[in-house]
Image (cartoon, rainbow, N blue to C red):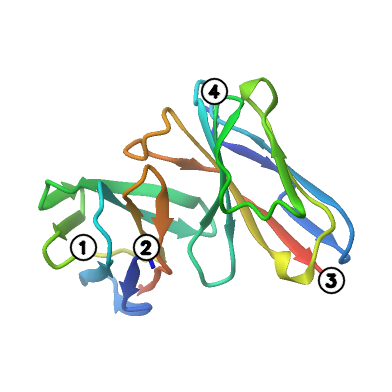
Amino acid sequence: SQQGEEDPQALSIQEGENATMNCSYKTSINNLQWYRQNSGRGLVHLILIRSNEREKHSGRLRVTLDTSKKSSSLLITASRAADTASYFCALDNTDKLIFGTGTRLQVFP
Amino acid sequence: EAGVVQSPRYKIIEKKQPVAFWCNPISGHNTLYWYRQNLGQGPELLIRYENEEAVDDSQLPKDRFSAERLKGVDSTLKIQPAELGDSAVYLCASSLGGNSAYEQYFGPGTRLTVT
């Protein structure tokens, strides 16, 4: 399967804590993207990391990519209640995005 | 700037009935996508358009699903007849280009319930 698999499936933390989500895959990729989905704003692009990159930052988000292990991680630092959402990794190897099953993050105030 | 617009937001129909979803992409976006998202899953691509041309419809169940993008702007996705398993959220997205390095902008989706 080309689909990425996120781990954990669900994560609950307190505000201020860090949240780490992982994505593993089996095929080669051109790039990997992370998306967030909540009821208020739908599905929103967070960050794209190319296969020749190892780490990218965007605000409180840090994404790493290890192509040798075929895995990526998304770290959200100093989490807020508003970060409560489902987070999906999406793989691209043929100009088509294949979304994983997602990690459901709950941040308690 | 207006985002991707979809209508209706919700639709409840009985099985065997037809249903249609409409999408208006972001102005200037040549690439348009239709996805289906089942409960607890990530979105799955149904079809991708580059302007008026469907360049990837390999995942579209062609026996009952059809789509069109007249004039390369708005798009309509149709199901006829609907089955119970078609209950899902149907998402439309658009991007500046077909290379998936471009960010995709998603609409709010249409939640379809087939009874």
Q: Which label sits in the foreground, 1 or 2? A: 2
Which numbered disc, 3 or 4, marks the residue that appears first in the sequence?
4
- B17 left or right of B102? right
Q: Which mark is residue B27?
A: 4
Q: Distance between the residues labelled 3 and 4?
A: 36 Å
Pointer 1 and pointer 2 on the same chain: yes
**Residue B25, position as x, y percentages in the image:** 58, 31
Q: Judging from the image, what secondary structure is the residue with disc 4 in?
A: loop
Q: Residue at x 54, y 23 (%)?
A: B27
**Identity of the amino acid at label 1?**
Ser
Which numbered disc, 1 or 2, marks the residue that appears first in the sequence?
2
Q: How far apart are marks 4 and 2 (CA)?
A: 31 Å
| Residue corresponding to mark 3 | B115
| Residue corresponding to mark 1 | A72
**Which residue is at the front of the view, A2 or A39?**
A2
- B108 left or right of B82? left
Q: Are marks 4 and 2 in contact (CB under 8 Å)?
A: no
Q: Which chain carries label 4?
A: B
**Residue A101, position as x, y percentages in the image:** 43, 69
Crowding at label 2, few (<14), some or many (≥20) Cα neighbours within 10 Å?
A: some
**Res B88 → quadrant:** bottom right
Q: Do the residues labelled 3 and 1 touch (CB within 8 Å)?
A: no
Q: Which residue is drawn at 56% across and 49% down?
A: B58
Crowding at label 3, few (<14), some or many (≥20) Cα neighbours within 10 Å?
A: few
**Identity of the amino acid at label 2?**
Gln
| Residue corresponding to mark 2 | A2
Q: Which residue is drawn at 67% across and 55% down?
A: B61
